[in-house]
Amino acid sequence: MSDFESAPPAKAVPNGMPFPSFDLPLPDKPEIITANIQKLVELTSNPLSTDEWMAAIDFLTRTGQKCTPLRQETILLSDVLGVSALVDAINNPVIEGATESSVLGPFFTEDSADVDFGESIASEGKGDYMYVEGRILTTDGEPVPNAVIETWETDADGFYDTQYADRSHPDCRGRLRSDDDGRFGYRAVVPVAYPVPGDGPVGELLLLLGRHNMRPNHLHITVEAPGFHKLVTALYPEGCDYIVSDCVFGVKKSLVVSLKDVTDDEEARKLGFPRGGSFKLLQHNIVLLTEEQSAAIRARVDEERGVITADKY
Ligand SMILES: [Fe+2]
């Protein structure tokens, strides 16, 4: 490290840009995502010139060069441009009652540890206690047993484990399975709002656009079960200021959840929280579509939009 490079900050640092001066509707539909990003991009007073062609090439080159096995700057670029949310919304329409999807984001890893029912995905000291529980269900309310659930989140400092240079093992992430009744439960920490990485080309882009780089606090969850459409989603505890201006357009109304305060030392210890005291309780059922349901709704939505699929040429 040269004298000019400082050590990484102990807490994730926002880029200092203000909230947008106008309200953006939550991006529950593809059309809203596109309108929101257009409105934000129009904020710039820096029109495209010929010289900027080379700047764009340089930018894209540096974006690729910034990627490592644990740092995905290109997904981040797609995220802040609203492309990830748009592709997700187009490909994963749901019917009433099914859990809506959200962006995967750049912090998923394949190396999560398996976590038994009720165990913790976070090592001690990573943040305020949170217990997460619910059931994996079909749209008819039937349990989906043995579904594979992957879940990951920030620690209290606003970092994912992969953002620590000295990462030795996965933390604040885990893989678990629903039981015979579709139930799942695990200990975690309360995630916090965080800035997406600002030390790369995408961080520069957001500054040039005058956009803040914050995401509201959230818990990532993916669920896979044979015969069901894979769900990639996240839950957003209500009350965070950034819910209405998420820099990657991930929030949908149905994914905003409330955390219950539980101040019961005995209950906290019974659930396995070593320090006892109090904890937050996140209770949320996840409703999966079967592959057939997902394909049918996708075909219907495509037809409504006038999309010509390959088999119709
Ligand atoms: Fe995230």
Image (spheres, rainbow, N blue to C red):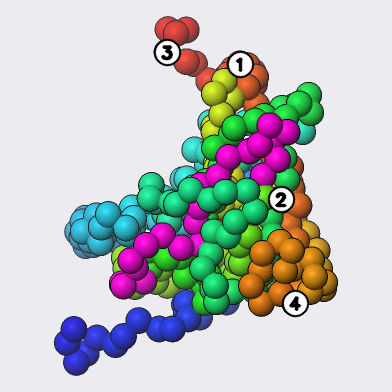
Of residue 168 and residue 39, the one placed in the foreground of this image is 168
Nearest-to-viewer mark from 3 and 4: 4
Instruction: Please name the residue that numbered disc 4 is placed on.
Output: 277
- For the N terminus, the quadrant is bottom left
> Which of labels 1 and 2 is toward the front?
2
Q: CA distance from mark 3 to mark 4?
A: 58 Å
With respect to residue 306, does 114 lie above or below? below
Direction from residue 279 to residue 27 in the image, left or right: left
Between tags 3 and 1, which lies in front?
1
Q: Which residue is mark 1?
A: 292
Q: Give the mark toward the camera: 3 or 2.
A: 2
Front label number (4 vs 1):
4
**Above or below — where is 243 with respect to 6?**
above
Q: Earlier in the sequence, mark 3 or mark 4?
A: 4
Q: Nearer the viewer, residue 124 or 213?
A: 124
Amino acid type of the residue that numbered disc 4 sits on in the rendered structure: Gly
Label 3, on which residue? 310
* Upstream in sequence: badge 4 or badge 2: 2
Can residue 292 be spotted in the picture? yes
Q: Which residue is mark 2?
A: 133
Give the residue drawn at x 21%, y 59%.
65
How far is disc 3 from disc 2 in space, using C-alphas? 41 Å
First along the sequence among labels 4 and 1: 4
